[in-house]
Amino acid sequence: MKTVQVDIFQKCYEFTEADAARHDGLYPFFRPIEGYSGARVISQGRELIMAGSNNYLGLSLDARVREAAINAVKQYGASCSGSRFMNGTLKLHEELEERLAHFVGREAALCFTTGYQTNLGAISALTGRGEHVLTDKLNHASIMDGIFLSIGMNHQVNVHRYKHNNIEQLLQILESLPPDQPKLLVTDGVFSMEGDIARLPQLRELARRYGARVYLDEAHAIGVVGATGRGTLEHYDDRSLADLVMCTFSKSFGSIGGFIAGESVIIDYIKHFARPLIFSASMPPSNLAAVMKSLEIIEDEPERVTRLQQIADRMRREFTRLGFDIGTSETAVIPLIIGDTQKTFRFWKYLYENGVYVNPVVSPAVPPNRALIRTSYMAIHEDPDLDRLLEVAEAGGKAIGII
């Protein structure tokens, strides 16, 4: 019998959903931004209010941050051209790591080239055969991929997913596990789609009771929550609530990269076993310098955090008044939960055509039937732009039958 050959590219030829959305004018992804002006962007030749950026404190646009990046390129060049493990460690890396450790109240820190790689490398380095990882079902994809890498490397890492912020289910899982087997509890501080905050004191109490360590992802928390922007631990006024603190630089720090911070001995272990650190080129000098300047600004200008929190409070209040479902949001990440995918894309299109740039999010990035518009805010937003955004959202919501 003749064997039928199948082209590995066949699935690519059969993928038609994106083209169908483009044909209907409802394709929202990969739209190039041609320029920035404060909290506004230029897209397809038009100026729009940016209400979908993670640049929470506006620092990627700050003149001081830009100047620091430019000066670093002049001094060190555009790349380190090597991994941290070999020739890619600069004094800038070590200086930034020392400052970050102090900022989050830990002994040591370690920088990775992206936030994604930070979770991928740290989680996979820390978890091994026969050990247990407990993870919130709404944790970021990079956390899950770090766990999947652990499974691929060690085969018998045991993964337990509990319902979002559900302390009761987490307790049931912990009670079912052997007390003599190591456990790592991983959670976002602020959840990237829901905009709510982890119930960290309760998580920490369970972790202590059942011998688990706590790994806290602060990507959307540092610069966003806490009186001075130090994140979830400051929000709860207790630095002991986590054993490891992770954050990315592509949000409040206005650059790219990420770090993990904790006890010196733990960070040194990750440094020697995290494959994404060892086998990737290190953070470029420009990004290091930008992060250091942003960190300095965050420490010196807490009013930026205060302004962001005031904006977030106002927008949650106003969207609720208008009749939008914002779920459990507590922060500057405010979802407008629609449910129906087609309505979500139509609402996105209405907003875009009327001068508002936001992000539609559909399954599998969110659970089925929970499609939403993810809005997020920056400290540099001005009140007239926020007024206009609310006006357009109200009109679009009524036109499409969302509110």
Image (spheres, rainbow, N blue to C red):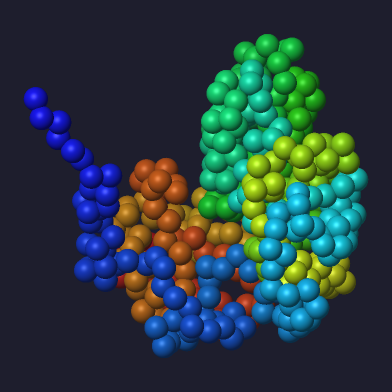
Give how far across and how far down residue 122 sits, in percent: 70, 41
The C terminus sits in image quarter: bottom left
Q: Is residue 119 above or below residue 1?
A: below
Q: Residue at x 70, y 24 (%)?
A: 183
Give how far across and how far down residue 177 sits, in percent: 65, 14
Tell me if 359 is positioned left or right of 22 in this view. Answer: right
Occupied quadrant, residue 76: bottom right
Q: Residue at x 66, y 57 (%)?
A: 281
The N terminus sits in image quarter: top left
Q: Residue at x 57, y 53 (%)?
A: 192
| Outermost residue to the left | 1
Give how far across and how far down residue 342 sits, in percent: 29, 58
Occupied quadrant, residue 181: top right
Tell me if 304 is positioned left or right of 10 in this view. Answer: right
In this view of the protein, can residue 287 be seen by the observer?
Answer: no
Q: Pick whichever, 277 or 163, lies toward us.
A: 277
Q: Pick whichever, 255 or 62, lies toward us.
A: 255
Tell me if 193 is positioned left or right of 279 in this view. Answer: left
Give how far across and how far down residue 132 sits, in percent: 64, 23
Q: Residue at x 32, y 66 (%)?
A: 27
Q: Pick whichever, 212 or 320, lies toward us.
A: 212
In this view of the protein, can residue 24 be seen by the observer?
Answer: yes
Occupied quadrant, residue 256: bottom right
How many numbered markers are drawn?
Answer: 0
